[in-house]
Image (cartoon, rainbow, N blue to C red):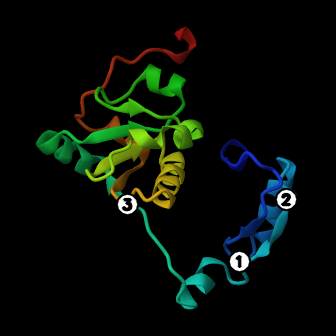
């Protein structure tokens, strides 16, 4: 996703990755044109925490919890999947804001009210939550398991359309 989210391939990068995966991360970045890796944090994220550096976390809840919240307060929900995924099936009142376009739509996210985000399985929505938190949106909650988990609830979904017909 770095190639989609960081436009400047000359952007200096310092990696904080699990120990033993440093070279793999550098190689993967290089394969998509990011050759300006300055280095990595020895010991990864644990070293950062042990040094007492500031950290933040993403709140994540199960889809079943969203179902209960949805019944009570009808919160804002953002689907960060690609538009084609969204069009094939989605939570009826969810707004589509693809991860690749999130920085262009920051003004659309609530500043104060809690809102929820999801993707297909949970990976992209955690990236989206990180981007939102970096932009001072601390009222975001991720839906664990994404749309795959949401489909197992009783949340009101749009009609399912085969993506090949879109």
- Residue at position x 52%, y 89% from top? 52
Q: Nearer the viewer, residue 39 or 85?
A: 39
Determine crowd level at label 2: few under 14, some 14-19, many 20+ residues with C-alpha closer than 10 A. some
- Which type of secondary structure does the marked residue at label 1 adopt? loop
The residue most toward the top is 165
Determine crowd level at label 3: few under 14, some 14-19, many 20+ residues with C-alpha closer than 10 A. many
**For residue 51, side relative to residue 23 (left or right):** left
The residue most toward the front is 107
Residue hosting label 1: 19
The answer for how far apart the CA atoms under marks 1 and 3 are is 29 Å
Q: Along the polypeptide, which appears first: circle 1 or circle 3? A: 1
The residue most toward the left is 72
- Residue at position x 82%, y 47% from top? 32
x and y percentages locating residue 133 in the rendered image:
46, 59
x and y percentages locating residue 59 in the rendered image:
37, 62
Residue hosting label 3: 138
- Residue at position x 24%, y 51% from top? 65
Residue 20 in which image quadrant: bottom right
Residue 88 in which image quadrant: top left
The answer for how far apart the CA atoms under marks 3 and 2 are is 33 Å
Residue hosting label 2: 27
x and y percentages locating residue 123 in the rendered image:
53, 50
Taking 83 as reference, is 111 above or below it?
Answer: below
Find out whether the residues at labels 1 and 3 contact each other: C-beta distance under 8 Å.
Answer: no
- Which type of secondary structure does the marked residue at label 2 adopt? helix
């Amino acid at each position: 996703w770095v190639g989609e989210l960081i436009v400047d391939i000359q952007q200096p990068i310092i990696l904080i990755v699990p120990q033993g995966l440093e070279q793999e991360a550098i190689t993967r970045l290089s394969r998509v044109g990011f050759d300006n890796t300055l280095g990595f944090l020895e010991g990864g994220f644990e070293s950062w925490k042990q040094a007492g550096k500031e950290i933040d976390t993403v709140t994540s809840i199960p889809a079943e919890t969203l179902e209960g919240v949805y019944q009570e307060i009808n919160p804002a929900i953002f689907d960060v999947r690609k538009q084609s995924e969204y069009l094939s099936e989605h939570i009826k009142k969810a707004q589509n804001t693809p991860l690749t376009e999130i920085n262009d739509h920051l003004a659309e996210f609530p500043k104060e009210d809690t809102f929820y985000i999801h993707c297909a399985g949970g990976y992209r929505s955690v990236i989206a939550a990180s981007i939102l938190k970096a932009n001072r949106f601390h009222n975001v909650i991720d839906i664990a398991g994404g749309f795959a988990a949401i489909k197992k609830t009783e949340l009101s979904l749009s009609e399912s359309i085969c993506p090949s017909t879109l």
